[in-house]
Image: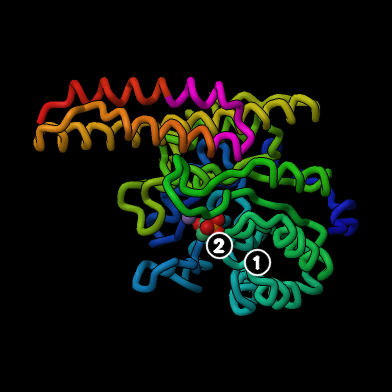
Amino acid sequence: MSSELLNDIQPLAAMGSPAIVAGPCSAESEQQTLDTARALSAIGVKVFRAGIWKPRTMPGGFEGVGDIGLEWLQRVRLETGMALATEVATVEHVRAALKADIDILWIGARTTANPFAIQSIADELQGHDEVTVLVKNPVNPDLDLWLGALQRIRNAGITRLGAVHRGFSSAGDHIYRNDPQWHIPFELRRLAPGMTILCDPSHIGGKREYVEHLCQLAMDVGFDGLMIECHCDPDHALSDSAQQITPNSLQTILNRLVVRSGTPVEDELGLLRQQIDDCDHELLAVLTRRMSVSREIGRFKQAHNLRIVQPARYQDVIKARLDEGKRLGLDPDFTQRIMQAIHEESVRQQLTTKN
Ligand code: PEP
Ligand code: MN
Protein backbone atom coordinates (compact mmCIF):
# COMPACT_ATOMS: atom_id res chain seq x y z
CA MET A 1 0.00 0.00 0.00
CA SER A 2 1.18 3.51 -0.66
CA SER A 3 2.21 5.42 2.40
CA GLU A 4 3.36 8.65 0.77
CA LEU A 5 1.29 10.66 3.19
CA LEU A 6 3.34 9.32 6.06
CA ASN A 7 6.68 10.23 4.47
CA ASP A 8 6.62 13.76 5.74
CA ILE A 9 5.72 12.95 9.34
CA GLN A 10 8.26 14.57 11.65
CA PRO A 11 9.53 13.10 14.92
CA LEU A 12 7.67 14.12 18.08
CA ALA A 13 10.80 15.74 19.47
CA ALA A 14 8.92 17.38 22.35
CA MET A 15 8.27 13.94 23.84
CA GLY A 16 11.99 13.46 24.60
CA SER A 17 14.64 11.09 23.40
CA PRO A 18 13.90 8.37 24.16
CA ALA A 19 10.29 9.44 24.72
CA ILE A 20 9.00 8.05 28.00
CA VAL A 21 5.24 7.96 28.51
CA ALA A 22 4.27 6.39 31.82
CA GLY A 23 1.23 6.12 34.05
CA PRO A 24 -1.48 3.72 35.12
CA CYS A 25 -3.47 1.56 32.77
CA SER A 26 -6.51 3.32 34.25
CA ALA A 27 -7.12 6.37 36.37
CA GLU A 28 -9.02 4.78 39.28
CA SER A 29 -9.33 7.54 41.85
CA GLU A 30 -8.01 11.03 42.26
CA GLN A 31 -5.63 9.80 44.95
CA GLN A 32 -4.21 6.95 42.87
CA THR A 33 -3.85 9.20 39.82
CA LEU A 34 -2.05 11.94 41.73
CA ASP A 35 0.13 9.60 43.82
CA THR A 36 1.31 7.84 40.68
CA ALA A 37 1.85 11.08 38.79
CA ARG A 38 3.82 12.71 41.60
CA ALA A 39 6.12 9.70 41.89
CA LEU A 40 6.65 9.61 38.12
CA SER A 41 7.31 13.31 37.91
CA ALA A 42 9.87 12.96 40.72
CA ILE A 43 11.88 10.50 38.60
CA GLY A 44 11.81 12.79 35.59
CA VAL A 45 8.91 11.42 33.52
CA LYS A 46 7.50 14.20 31.34
CA VAL A 47 4.42 12.57 29.80
CA PHE A 48 1.71 11.00 31.97
CA ARG A 49 -0.68 8.40 30.58
CA ALA A 50 -3.94 7.20 32.11
CA GLY A 51 -6.95 5.53 30.52
CA ILE A 52 -10.30 6.88 31.64
CA TRP A 53 -12.53 5.06 29.15
CA LYS A 54 -11.37 1.46 29.15
CA PRO A 55 -12.14 -0.98 26.33
CA ARG A 56 -12.58 -4.25 28.23
CA THR A 57 -12.90 -7.58 26.49
CA MET A 58 -15.58 -8.85 28.85
CA PRO A 59 -18.55 -6.89 30.21
CA GLY A 60 -18.78 -6.36 33.93
CA GLY A 61 -15.16 -5.41 34.46
CA PHE A 62 -13.87 -1.97 35.39
CA GLU A 63 -14.68 0.21 32.39
CA GLY A 64 -12.92 3.36 33.51
CA VAL A 65 -14.00 6.33 35.59
CA GLY A 66 -15.14 8.40 32.59
CA ASP A 67 -15.15 12.19 32.29
CA ILE A 68 -14.36 12.85 35.96
CA GLY A 69 -10.89 11.45 35.24
CA LEU A 70 -10.22 14.41 32.95
CA GLU A 71 -10.35 16.68 35.99
CA TRP A 72 -7.83 14.48 37.83
CA LEU A 73 -5.55 14.62 34.79
CA GLN A 74 -5.76 18.40 34.76
CA ARG A 75 -4.71 18.44 38.40
CA VAL A 76 -1.73 16.31 37.43
CA ARG A 77 -0.66 18.91 34.88
CA LEU A 78 -1.23 21.76 37.29
CA GLU A 79 0.88 20.13 40.02
CA THR A 80 3.63 18.47 38.01
CA GLY A 81 3.71 20.18 34.63
CA MET A 82 3.62 16.80 32.90
CA ALA A 83 1.97 16.52 29.48
CA LEU A 84 -1.20 14.39 29.52
CA ALA A 85 -2.14 11.39 27.40
CA THR A 86 -5.38 9.43 27.36
CA GLU A 87 -7.13 6.91 25.11
CA VAL A 88 -10.01 7.92 22.88
CA ALA A 89 -12.25 5.45 21.12
CA THR A 90 -15.34 7.45 20.16
CA VAL A 91 -16.29 10.91 18.90
CA GLU A 92 -17.59 11.75 22.40
CA HIS A 93 -14.23 10.84 23.94
CA VAL A 94 -12.41 13.07 21.44
CA ARG A 95 -14.73 15.97 22.16
CA ALA A 96 -14.36 15.63 25.93
CA ALA A 97 -10.57 15.18 25.76
CA LEU A 98 -10.08 18.19 23.47
CA LYS A 99 -12.30 20.29 25.68
CA ALA A 100 -10.17 19.28 28.67
CA ASP A 101 -7.07 20.28 26.72
CA ILE A 102 -5.43 16.84 26.85
CA ASP A 103 -2.11 17.03 24.98
CA ILE A 104 -1.89 13.54 23.54
CA LEU A 105 -4.76 11.31 22.44
CA TRP A 106 -3.96 7.69 21.79
CA ILE A 107 -6.08 5.31 19.80
CA GLY A 108 -6.22 1.81 21.27
CA ALA A 109 -5.61 -1.46 19.48
CA ARG A 110 -9.27 -2.46 19.32
CA THR A 111 -10.20 0.86 17.76
CA THR A 112 -7.38 0.87 15.19
CA ALA A 113 -8.82 -2.39 13.86
CA ASN A 114 -12.06 -0.59 12.93
CA PRO A 115 -11.83 1.86 9.99
CA PHE A 116 -15.33 3.27 10.69
CA ALA A 117 -14.35 4.19 14.23
CA ILE A 118 -11.05 5.65 13.05
CA GLN A 119 -12.74 7.74 10.37
CA SER A 120 -15.21 9.22 12.83
CA ILE A 121 -12.37 10.07 15.22
CA ALA A 122 -10.41 11.60 12.32
CA ASP A 123 -13.43 13.74 11.33
CA GLU A 124 -13.74 15.00 14.89
CA LEU A 125 -10.03 15.87 15.00
CA GLN A 126 -10.25 18.04 11.88
CA GLY A 127 -8.99 21.53 12.69
CA HIS A 128 -7.24 20.46 15.92
CA ASP A 129 -3.69 20.32 14.70
CA GLU A 130 -2.43 21.39 18.13
CA VAL A 131 -3.08 17.92 19.49
CA THR A 132 -0.71 14.94 19.27
CA VAL A 133 -2.20 11.60 18.25
CA LEU A 134 -0.62 8.20 18.84
CA VAL A 135 -2.05 5.23 16.99
CA LYS A 136 -1.53 1.82 18.56
CA ASN A 137 -1.27 -1.16 16.24
CA PRO A 138 -4.51 -3.05 15.59
CA VAL A 139 -5.12 -6.21 17.65
CA ASN A 140 -4.53 -8.35 14.58
CA PRO A 141 -1.15 -8.41 12.79
CA ASP A 142 -2.24 -6.37 9.77
CA LEU A 143 0.18 -3.59 8.83
CA ASP A 144 -2.23 -2.10 6.29
CA LEU A 145 -4.89 -1.55 8.96
CA TRP A 146 -2.32 0.27 11.06
CA LEU A 147 -1.13 2.35 8.10
CA GLY A 148 -4.71 3.06 7.07
CA ALA A 149 -5.56 4.39 10.52
CA LEU A 150 -2.45 6.61 10.55
CA GLN A 151 -3.34 7.94 7.12
CA ARG A 152 -6.93 8.72 8.09
CA ILE A 153 -5.66 10.77 11.05
CA ARG A 154 -3.01 12.42 8.86
CA ASN A 155 -5.68 13.26 6.25
CA ALA A 156 -7.57 15.10 8.98
CA GLY A 157 -4.66 17.54 9.16
CA ILE A 158 -2.93 16.07 12.22
CA THR A 159 0.82 16.37 11.78
CA ARG A 160 1.87 15.54 15.34
CA LEU A 161 1.37 11.87 14.73
CA GLY A 162 3.12 8.80 16.10
CA ALA A 163 2.59 5.06 16.49
CA VAL A 164 2.73 2.65 19.41
CA HIS A 165 3.64 -1.00 19.03
CA ARG A 166 1.80 -3.12 21.63
CA GLY A 167 1.93 -6.56 20.01
CA PHE A 168 -0.81 -8.68 18.46
CA SER A 169 -3.40 -11.09 19.83
CA SER A 170 -2.81 -14.69 18.87
CA ALA A 171 -4.26 -18.06 19.71
CA GLY A 172 -2.37 -20.70 21.69
CA ASP A 173 0.22 -20.59 24.43
CA HIS A 174 2.80 -17.86 24.19
CA ILE A 175 5.33 -16.40 26.53
CA TYR A 176 4.04 -12.90 25.97
CA ARG A 177 0.48 -11.62 26.27
CA ASN A 178 0.64 -10.08 22.80
CA ASP A 179 2.92 -11.51 20.16
CA PRO A 180 5.43 -8.80 19.17
CA GLN A 181 5.92 -9.79 15.51
CA TRP A 182 8.73 -7.24 15.37
CA HIS A 183 8.90 -7.27 11.58
CA ILE A 184 5.58 -5.33 11.45
CA PRO A 185 6.72 -2.17 13.30
CA PHE A 186 10.02 -2.49 11.51
CA GLU A 187 8.23 -2.32 8.17
CA LEU A 188 6.24 0.66 9.45
CA ARG A 189 9.55 2.35 10.24
CA ARG A 190 10.72 1.75 6.67
CA LEU A 191 7.53 3.27 5.25
CA ALA A 192 7.41 6.24 7.63
CA PRO A 193 11.07 6.85 8.48
CA GLY A 194 10.60 10.14 10.35
CA MET A 195 7.60 9.11 12.42
CA THR A 196 8.01 8.51 16.16
CA ILE A 197 7.30 4.88 16.99
CA LEU A 198 7.03 3.91 20.64
CA CYS A 199 7.04 0.43 22.09
CA ASP A 200 4.56 -0.59 24.80
CA PRO A 201 6.37 -3.36 26.72
CA SER A 202 3.54 -3.60 29.25
CA HIS A 203 0.87 -4.80 26.82
CA ILE A 204 3.34 -6.92 24.84
CA GLY A 205 4.70 -8.73 27.92
CA GLY A 206 1.55 -8.90 30.02
CA LYS A 207 3.67 -9.59 33.13
CA ARG A 208 5.77 -7.10 35.03
CA GLU A 209 8.83 -9.38 34.99
CA TYR A 210 9.08 -9.05 31.21
CA VAL A 211 8.95 -5.27 31.12
CA GLU A 212 12.65 -4.52 31.62
CA HIS A 213 13.85 -6.97 28.98
CA LEU A 214 11.31 -5.62 26.49
CA CYS A 215 12.30 -2.00 27.19
CA GLN A 216 15.95 -2.76 26.44
CA LEU A 217 15.02 -4.74 23.39
CA ALA A 218 12.88 -1.89 22.09
CA MET A 219 15.87 0.42 22.40
CA ASP A 220 18.15 -2.12 20.72
CA VAL A 221 15.93 -2.41 17.66
CA GLY A 222 15.52 1.33 17.27
CA PHE A 223 12.18 2.39 18.81
CA ASP A 224 12.00 6.08 19.67
CA GLY A 225 10.57 5.61 23.11
CA LEU A 226 8.41 3.62 25.50
CA MET A 227 4.86 3.72 26.79
CA ILE A 228 4.92 1.90 30.12
CA GLU A 229 2.11 1.17 32.56
CA CYS A 230 3.01 2.32 36.08
CA HIS A 231 0.82 2.25 39.15
CA CYS A 232 1.54 3.33 42.73
CA ASP A 233 0.06 0.00 43.93
CA PRO A 234 0.12 -2.41 40.96
CA ASP A 235 -1.15 -5.46 42.85
CA HIS A 236 -4.40 -3.68 43.55
CA ALA A 237 -4.82 -2.10 40.10
CA LEU A 238 -8.35 -2.39 38.72
CA SER A 239 -7.08 -3.26 35.22
CA ASP A 240 -3.93 -4.94 33.88
CA SER A 241 -2.62 -5.53 37.40
CA ALA A 242 -0.06 -8.20 36.42
CA GLN A 243 1.80 -6.00 33.98
CA GLN A 244 1.98 -2.71 35.86
CA ILE A 245 5.14 -1.68 37.65
CA THR A 246 5.79 0.82 40.42
CA PRO A 247 7.40 4.18 39.68
CA ASN A 248 10.39 2.86 41.68
CA SER A 249 10.80 -0.11 39.35
CA LEU A 250 10.50 2.22 36.39
CA GLN A 251 13.32 4.31 37.80
CA THR A 252 15.54 1.22 38.09
CA ILE A 253 14.68 0.17 34.54
CA LEU A 254 15.38 3.64 33.13
CA ASN A 255 18.67 3.90 35.01
CA ARG A 256 19.84 0.62 33.54
CA LEU A 257 18.50 1.28 30.06
CA VAL A 258 21.19 1.41 27.39
CA VAL A 259 20.17 3.69 24.55
CA ARG A 260 22.16 2.92 21.43
CA SER A 261 22.61 5.09 18.41
CA GLY A 262 22.13 2.21 16.01
CA THR A 263 22.60 2.35 12.29
CA PRO A 264 19.77 0.74 10.31
CA VAL A 265 22.02 -2.27 9.72
CA GLU A 266 22.52 -2.80 13.44
CA ASP A 267 18.80 -2.34 13.99
CA GLU A 268 18.07 -5.03 11.47
CA LEU A 269 20.55 -7.43 13.03
CA GLY A 270 19.06 -6.75 16.45
CA LEU A 271 15.62 -7.45 15.07
CA LEU A 272 16.65 -10.74 13.52
CA ARG A 273 18.38 -11.81 16.72
CA GLN A 274 15.23 -10.98 18.61
CA GLN A 275 13.25 -13.24 16.33
CA ILE A 276 15.74 -16.03 17.12
CA ASP A 277 15.33 -15.37 20.85
CA ASP A 278 11.54 -15.48 20.48
CA CYS A 279 11.73 -18.81 18.61
CA ASP A 280 14.00 -20.27 21.30
CA HIS A 281 11.61 -19.15 24.05
CA GLU A 282 8.78 -20.89 22.22
CA LEU A 283 10.83 -24.04 21.61
CA LEU A 284 11.70 -24.32 25.30
CA ALA A 285 8.09 -23.72 26.36
CA VAL A 286 6.86 -26.42 23.96
CA LEU A 287 9.56 -28.89 25.09
CA THR A 288 8.63 -28.31 28.72
CA ARG A 289 5.01 -29.03 27.90
CA ARG A 290 5.93 -32.15 25.96
CA MET A 291 8.00 -33.52 28.87
CA SER A 292 5.18 -32.96 31.26
CA VAL A 293 2.88 -34.98 28.99
CA SER A 294 5.59 -37.70 28.86
CA ARG A 295 5.66 -37.92 32.64
CA GLU A 296 1.88 -38.21 32.65
CA ILE A 297 2.16 -41.10 30.16
CA GLY A 298 4.88 -42.64 32.35
CA ARG A 299 2.53 -42.66 35.33
CA PHE A 300 -0.25 -44.18 33.24
CA LYS A 301 2.02 -46.96 31.94
CA GLN A 302 3.22 -47.77 35.46
CA ALA A 303 -0.32 -47.88 36.77
CA HIS A 304 -1.35 -50.27 33.97
CA ASN A 305 1.84 -52.29 33.97
CA LEU A 306 2.76 -51.37 30.39
CA ARG A 307 6.23 -51.23 28.86
CA ILE A 308 7.80 -47.79 28.71
CA VAL A 309 9.16 -48.13 25.17
CA GLN A 310 6.73 -49.44 22.59
CA PRO A 311 8.73 -49.84 19.35
CA ALA A 312 5.74 -49.76 16.98
CA ARG A 313 4.52 -46.47 18.39
CA TYR A 314 8.06 -45.05 18.26
CA GLN A 315 8.44 -46.03 14.58
CA ASP A 316 5.09 -44.45 13.72
CA VAL A 317 5.99 -41.21 15.50
CA ILE A 318 9.41 -40.89 13.86
CA LYS A 319 7.98 -41.60 10.41
CA ALA A 320 5.16 -39.09 10.82
CA ARG A 321 7.57 -36.40 12.04
CA LEU A 322 10.03 -37.07 9.21
CA ASP A 323 7.22 -36.75 6.64
CA GLU A 324 5.96 -33.57 8.24
CA GLY A 325 9.48 -32.13 8.50
CA LYS A 326 10.10 -32.87 4.82
CA ARG A 327 6.86 -31.19 3.86
CA LEU A 328 7.87 -28.11 5.88
CA GLY A 329 11.30 -28.02 4.22
CA LEU A 330 13.43 -29.32 7.11
CA ASP A 331 16.45 -31.50 6.46
CA PRO A 332 15.43 -35.14 7.25
CA ASP A 333 18.71 -35.87 9.04
CA PHE A 334 18.18 -32.89 11.28
CA THR A 335 14.56 -33.86 12.01
CA GLN A 336 15.67 -37.38 12.86
CA ARG A 337 18.38 -36.21 15.26
CA ILE A 338 16.04 -33.79 17.03
CA MET A 339 13.23 -36.35 17.36
CA GLN A 340 15.65 -38.99 18.68
CA ALA A 341 17.01 -36.61 21.29
CA ILE A 342 13.50 -35.66 22.37
CA HIS A 343 12.44 -39.29 22.50
CA GLU A 344 15.46 -40.28 24.61
CA GLU A 345 14.73 -37.56 27.13
CA SER A 346 11.07 -38.50 27.11
CA VAL A 347 11.92 -42.13 27.94
CA ARG A 348 14.26 -40.96 30.69
CA GLN A 349 11.48 -38.82 32.15
CA GLN A 350 9.05 -41.76 32.05
CA LEU A 351 11.57 -44.07 33.71
CA THR A 352 12.25 -41.65 36.55
CA THR A 353 8.60 -40.69 37.14
CA LYS A 354 7.13 -42.15 40.29
CA ASN A 355 3.43 -42.73 40.67
C1 PEP B 1 -4.01 0.65 27.32
O1 PEP B 1 -3.04 1.28 26.87
O2 PEP B 1 -4.33 0.61 28.50
C2 PEP B 1 -4.78 -0.18 26.36
C3 PEP B 1 -6.05 -0.48 26.55
O3 PEP B 1 -4.01 -0.58 25.38
P1 PEP B 1 -4.28 -1.47 24.06
O4 PEP B 1 -5.19 -0.68 23.19
O5 PEP B 1 -2.87 -1.58 23.54
O6 PEP B 1 -4.83 -2.79 24.50
MN1 MN C 1 -3.70 -1.48 29.97
| Rendered image: mark on residue 101 | 1
Residues drawn in magenta: 324-339
The stretch drawn in magenta includes residue 24: no
> What residue is rendered at 38% in x and 62% in y?
29
Q: Nearer the viewer, residue 343 or 161?
A: 343
Quadrant assignment, res 74: bottom right
Up-down: is 223 above or below 75?
Answer: above
Is the C-beta of the residue carrying label 2 under 8 Å from the nearest atom of ligand 1? no
- Seen from the viewer's position, the closer of residues 167 and 99 is 167
| Residue 233 circle label | none
Mark closer to the chain start, 2 or 1: 2
Judged left or right of residue 167, residue 39 is: left
- The location of residue 127, given as percent across then percent down, is 81, 73
Pointer 2: what residue? Answer: 74
Element under disc 1: loop
- In front here: 116 or 310? 310
Who's the residue at 37% across and 67% down the image? 62
Task: Please give the name of the residue rendered at 65% of the width and 66% of the height, measured from the top-left corner.
Answer: 101
